[in-house]
Image: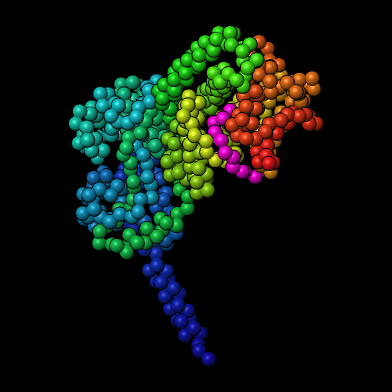
Amino acid sequence: MPSFKVILHLSLFIMTLFTSLTADNIKTIKMCNNPNWAPIEFAKDSNMSNMMGIAIDTIRVLEKDLNFKVKNIPTKSWTQSQLFLSEGKCDILPAAIATKKRKAYALFTKPYLSYSLAIITKNDKPFVRGIEDILDKTIARKKGSGLIQKLKNLYPEINIVETVDYLEALQRVSSGEIYATIATLPVASYFINQFALTNLHISGYTEMKYNLSIAVRKDNPELLKLLDKGLENVSQKQHREIYERWANRTITETFNYEYLIYFVLFVFAITFLILYKQNLLKKSNKDLEKKVKEKMEENLIQHQLIQEQAKLAAMGEMIGAIAHQWRQPLNALGLSIQNLEYDYHGGQIDEVFIKNYVRKNKITIKFMSQTIDDFRSFFKVDKVKETFSIKEAIDSTLSMQSVYLEKDNISYTLEGDDFRVYGLRSELQQVILSLVSNARDALVKNRVDGRRIKITLEDKAVMFADNAKGIPAHILDKIFEAYFTTKKDGAGTGIGLYMSKMIIEDNMNASISASNQKDGALFLLDFKEPSK
C-alpha cells in the first residue's frame, strides 16, 4: 500500500497539471481602442483602461463564449491604436472599417455592426433625398474622420466644418449655427439622448454605410477564424440588448410630403374634371331622359351616355377611395422603409417578421399601382374581353373601399371557392362597387349595429349579402329600373343597379337578381351557363 507521502505528492502533481491545462486554455488577447467614438467604443472619463460601448460589450460576449481574456493596451489616440496593431503591440481593434490601407497590416472578421450614415438637421428643416441636396449648406463632422476626405473627393464643392467631437457637431446644428451633420444612427441617438438635443431629426440618408469588423493582426489568421466563429454565435437578442443599452431611440425621421402633394393636386384636378363632365351630362340628360326611357334598347347613343355616367359615378367613389387610401399608406410606407434597415440591425425583428413585412409592403405597393391602373382604365374605349379570376376582381374592389367601410364600422368578408369568368374585369368591378356602395349607404342610413357585408362564392355564383334590414317589398321589383333611386335629390343617379343588370346580363351572359333574407338584402350573380 502506498505511503501517505506518496499520495500527497501525487495529488499535488495532479492539481498542478490541471491548473496548467486550464491556464493554457484561457488565451490572452491584447486590444487597442478608439477612445472617442461613443457609443460604439469610448474611454470613460478619458481613461483608456476603462473602455465602454457597443463594440466593447460584444467583445465581452466573445470573451465569455470563446474562453479567452482581453487585456486592454492604453493608447493616446485612435491613430496610435492603429499603429500599435500594425507593429504587433496589440492583437485586435474591436471596431474598424476594412479600408484598403488597413488591409495592408490587418485581417478583418465579417462585419458584425452595419450602420447607415444619416443626415441630421433641426426639426424645421425639410426632407432631403441625399447629400447632393445640401451641398450649398454647412455640414459639421468630427475632426480626423476619414469620411471628411471621402466627401471632399466625391464633392469638391462641399462645405465641411470640422469639430472637436460628435457632440460639438450636433450642438452646433441644434443651435442653428451649422445646417447639418452626418452620423450613424447609434452615435446620433446616443448624444441626442444624453444631452437632450430634442430639436434634431433625421432629414435623409447618404448612400454610404459603416460596416464594422474586428481588425486582427495580419500574422494571426487562427485568431481571425476563432473570432468569426464566435461572432456567428452571438444571437440577435444579444445584439439587440447591447444596442438598446447604449442607443435608445428618441430621434425622429421625417417623410417627404412633396410626392403626396403632387398626387393630391392630381386628384383634385381629375375630380374637378369629372364634376365638370357630370354637370355637362346632367344638363344634356334633361333633354334625353324621356327618349332614354321610351327607346332604351333602340338608341345606342343614349345607352352609351348612361354607361359613361355610371362609370363617372363609380369614378367618384374610386377617387375618394384613392385619396383616403393613399395618404396613410404613403406616409407609413415611407417611414417603414426608412426604419427597416435600422430595425433589422438593431435586432428588433426576426426572420418571420421581416418576410411578412416585405410581403405586406409589396402587396401595398402593388395595390397602390393597380389602383391607378384601374383608375385610368375607366377612360379606355378599346377594351378586350378576357377570362379572369372573379375572387381577385372582387377582392381588389373591396380593398379600394376598405377605408370607407372601416370608417363606417362595416366589416366585410369574401369566402368560397374561386372561379373564372369571361368579360371585362373593370365592368364587373363596377358592379361590385355599386353593390358595396348601396349596402354601405343602407347600413349607415338604417343605423344598424354590427354592420357587415358578406360575399360568398359558390357553384359559379356570387352571393352578396348585408344586414341592412332588407329592401322594402314595394320597391323590390323596381330597383333595376333606370333612374329609380331611394336617395334624396343629388345623392344618387338611379342608374347604378340598372347598369349592373346591363353589364351582367348583356355583356357577361349571366344573371343578377335581388331578394330579402332574414336581416338584409341578398343579390345573386349567377354565372352558370344558361340551359340550351
Q: Which residues are magenta?
A: 417-431
Residue extending farthest bottom? 1
Would residue 38 be seen by someone viewing this image from the given angle?
A: no
Q: Residue at x 54, y 33 (%)?
A: 424
**Residue 465 drawn at (x, y percent):** 71, 32
**Residue 389 drawn at (x, y percent):** 57, 41
Q: Is residue 439 magenta?
A: no
Instruction: Determine whether, in the image, residue 55 is placed left or right of residue 437.
Output: left
**Residue 464 drawn at (x, y percent):** 69, 33
Q: Residue at x 37, y 22 (%)?
A: 125
Q: Is residue 402 above or below residue 208?
A: above
Instruction: Determine whether, in the image, residue 485 is placed left or right of residue 128.
Output: right
Q: Nearer the viewer, residue 532 or 108?
A: 532
- Quarter residue 232 falls in: bottom left
The C terminus - image quarter: top right
* Count of numbered tags: 0
Q: Is residue 225 above or below residue 49?
A: below
Q: Residue at x 45, y 54 (%)?
A: 234
Would residue 411 be seen by someone viewing this image from the given angle?
A: yes
Q: Is residue 424 magenta?
A: yes
**Residue 137 drawn at (x, y percent):** 27, 24
Q: Nearer the viewer, residue 325 or 94?
A: 325
Q: Nearer the viewer, residue 219 or 126?
A: 126
Q: Nearer the viewer, residue 355 or 15?
A: 355
Q: Residue at x 50, y 12 (%)?
A: 276
Instruction: Determine whether, in the image, residue 31 is placed left or right of residue 532.
Output: left
- Quarter residue 128 falls in: top left
Q: Is residue 486 above or below residue 60?
A: above
* Colour style of the rendered protein structure: rainbow
